[in-house]
Amino acid sequence: MLKQKKFKKFLEESKDYTFLLPAGLFLLFFLIYPIIFNFNLSIRDVNISNLIHGERKVVGITNYITVLKDPIFMKALINSILFTLGTILLSTSIGFAFALFFNKSFPGHKWMRSVLLIAWMTPIIIIGTIFKWMLSGENGVFNDILMNIGILSEPIYWLTDTKTALLSVTLTNIWISIPFSMVIILSGLQALPEDVYEAARIDGANKVRQFFYITLPMMKSTLLVLLMLGVIFTFKVFDLIYIMTAGGPSDATQVIPFLAYQLSFGMYRFGEGAALSNISFILIGLLALVYLYFTRKDEVM
């Protein structure tokens, strides 16, 4: 009887936690297990011959050392940093300008804002294909426009020239990211108290002073969230690179996610590909820690 009472008491106390079971199972199978499996893969010598059958020899950190010593890794890391910084800085700045514009009430502002969201909602494969055609050196609309207005005297092969390929892909990703930045910033602007601006206007502060001394400081937490999400989303971009340039020409647009894909499914060096994925995961984790540090610092202050 005592055991039955204890068991019933346990069921009563734990029944609320059963609602967490679906989410827990989802995290276990689709997040925790892949991370553990990928780590196990990264410390073994796995190739096409022993992927399914055969001995997978444990090699420790050898795969990590091999990846870090590979010259293409440093090129991919630099390209990833340039690609991420360029996208974040410009998309955030332009998105902020659009958010300030659409934060005002004027005829048609709602449907105009919705039109801008099309860029964010459109599948990457469609956007990449369209921009690949627009940036074509032979019949691209960009060259046609620039030559008609006299900026160019001859066509530029944007995606096949090592000097312009990374820039072209970055500009495409900026175009995709602007609506996301605008929505996040706009939600932050709409939450700002209007009485603060009213007091500033009474004190004689113009629009520029209001922006730098009121809007920006009060938008700091929103901008930190946006920057953190933007870095994570941009640093792991794979599909756009795959569609537009496939890492070329001559690795000019090679980035870490695409290099990990090539190592695993192009060269069948699964251990090294897993190791590079873990390195990317660690880099993003460090950025997350920096974000947590700044947010915690603000809360303490």
Image: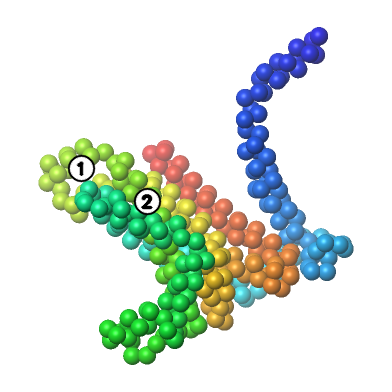
In the visual, does 50 lie left or right of 278?
right
Of the 4 image quadrants, the one containing the N terminus is top right
- As drawn, 192 above or below 46: above
Residue 242 vs residue 205, the one in the foreground: 242
Q: Quadrant of residue 58?
A: bottom right
The residue mark sitting in front, 1 or 2, is 2
In the visual, does 35 lie left or right of 173?
right
- As drawn, 62 above or below 181: below
Contact check, label 1 and label 2, Cβ < 8 Å: no
Residue under label 1, please give it: 197
Residue under label 2, please give it: 183
Whole-Å distance between the Cαs marked 1 and 2? 22 Å
Q: Residue at x 75, y 55 (%)?
A: 40
Q: Can residue 124 be seen in this view?
A: yes
Helix, strand or loop at disc 2?
helix
Look at label 1 and name its amino acid.
Tyr
Decide: few, some or many residues near mark 1? Use Cα within 10 Å; few <14, some 14-19, many ≥20: some
Q: Residue furthest bottom?
A: 153
Percent position of residue 108, x then y? 25, 53
Residue 49 vs residue 251, the one in the foreground: 49
Helix, strand or loop at disc 1?
helix
Percent position of residue 17, x then y? 64, 28
Look at label 2 and name its amino acid.
Val
Q: Which of marks 1 and 2 is nearer the N terminus?
A: 2
Q: Which residue is drawn at 41% across and 70% down?
A: 171
- As drawn, 15 above or below 172: above
